[in-house]
Image (cartoon, grey):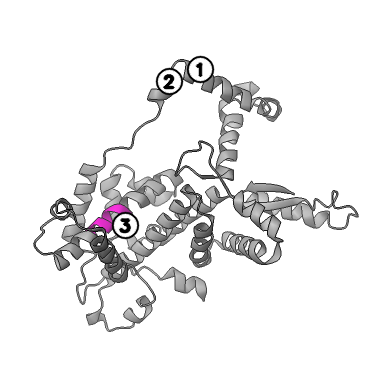
Amino acid sequence: VVLVHGDLGTGERINSILKRRSIEDRPWERFQYVEYCPGYFHVKMACIDTIWRIAIKPVLGRLDETCVMKDVGIFRPRETGMVISKCEFRRMHQLVKHIGIVRRLDCWRIAIQKNHPQYLTLEDFAKSNPKLDDLEALAEELVKEYVADHRMSSMRLNPGSERDEQFENAALIQRYFLLYEELVHAMNFGDIGRLERTLLPWILLFKATGKHKYATAMEKHLVQTHFERPESLRRAIRYNMLVNPTGKPGKFRGVDWVVEGYNCEIKVNHGGQGATRTIKRMIAESALIGTFKEVNESIENNLLLHVTSTHGEPDMRRTFHEVRRSLSESSPHTFVAGRKSMYSLPDMLNKGAE
């Protein structure tokens, strides 16, 4: 069996080949040995695009003081137009990560003021060295109070004077961002079981936002893996969904991420320039990509270039403080009865399950 990882286009080509060759006599000629596995790097990009379609693409969804675009304007004031017009993966990935952190900190601030009024700030509470059991109890309370769940539908049936539409939007944003955080965490640490479980709500979100190809592909992959394929093949597929090129903890990546790296080497770095940039040249150079990478690594190690080539994480403390101040003023996580919103975020999990 040969496992082929790639995006949906790769899967469609493989399915087309299998259908065209299905009339052949021998398994080899039918390409019966080929098994397609969806690339999880492309799945992660599809999840980011789904969040962009839900929270940023609607025009009215960018007008409230508590909307996601208000936070984007503080994190990236010069790139708001690019965020609105195009879902670029790296930019949106960082925004979802940072906005999610700050919004969860705002929820912690409100919960601590409610349960421990003697502490005025999160910093004061942290200096008190709280016990792990107390933190876990607070975290469970935060999830029940500030993350949308099955109660959202009944909340929206209440009269307008008993609803807070901006609080509802904030709870839905927390749900979508946390689902993405869990997916990324499962991928980074190679937790295959958790990764497969996190795909279930994302299939519904794909359906609700019009990404039907991804929803169908992931549903088909899970059904085939767990109910149709033999145990040995199932084990082989699940244990080869992710790879860890560096061998470091928390550095697992989708196989298609490695393939995209080689594509960059072939097409961009060693594909030629001007008149020499031809498909023939790229095919000829592709066999030498591994050698080129080994030469570069040897030079970096001999000259100790790798010591200074990796950038550290940016210091986001000032920006986080500014966004936290903005959230404390707009109070998206404080329930205010009768507060209206220019746009009510749809509950996409319910919509996808219809």
Q: Residue at x 62, y 23 (%)?
A: 291
Where is 28 relative to 59, above or below? above
Q: Does the magenta segment cover residue 28? A: no
Discs 2/3, front: 2
Residue bearing the label numbered 1 = 299
Q: Secondary structure at mark 1?
A: helix
Mark 1 neighbour class, 10 Å CA radius: few under 14, some 14 to 19, many 20 or more = few
Q: Residue at x 26, y 77 (%)?
A: 163
Q: Say what amino acid the circle numbered 3 marks.
A: Val
How many numbered marks have been drawn onto this rendered protein structure? 3
Q: Which residue does the numbered mark 3 point to in the structure image?
A: 68
Label whose residue precedes the other's in the sequence (2 or 1): 1
Compare marks 2 and 3 and give the one earlier in the sequence: 3
In the rendered image, residue 101 lying in the magenta stretch gets the answer yes
Specify the segment rendered in magenta: 100-107
Give the residue type that dot 2 points to: Leu
- Give coordinates of residue 113: x percent, y percent: 14, 64
Picture coordinates of residue 232 (x, y %)?
70, 56
Which numbered mark, 1 or 3, is in the foreground of this view? Answer: 1
- Say if residue 7 shows up in the picture: no
Decide if residue 326 is in sight here: yes
21 or 146, which is in the foreground?
146
Examine the rendered structure and indicate whether residue 128 appears above or below residue 247. below
Point 64% across, 50% down: residue: 9
Q: Report helix, strand or loop for mark 3.
A: helix
Residue positioned 15% across, 56% down in the render: 125
Q: Which residue is mark 2?
A: 305
Label 2 close to label 1 by CB (< 8 Å): yes
- Identify the amino acid type marked 1: Ile
Circle 3: is it few (<14), some (14-19), or many (20+) Cα within 10 Å?
A: many
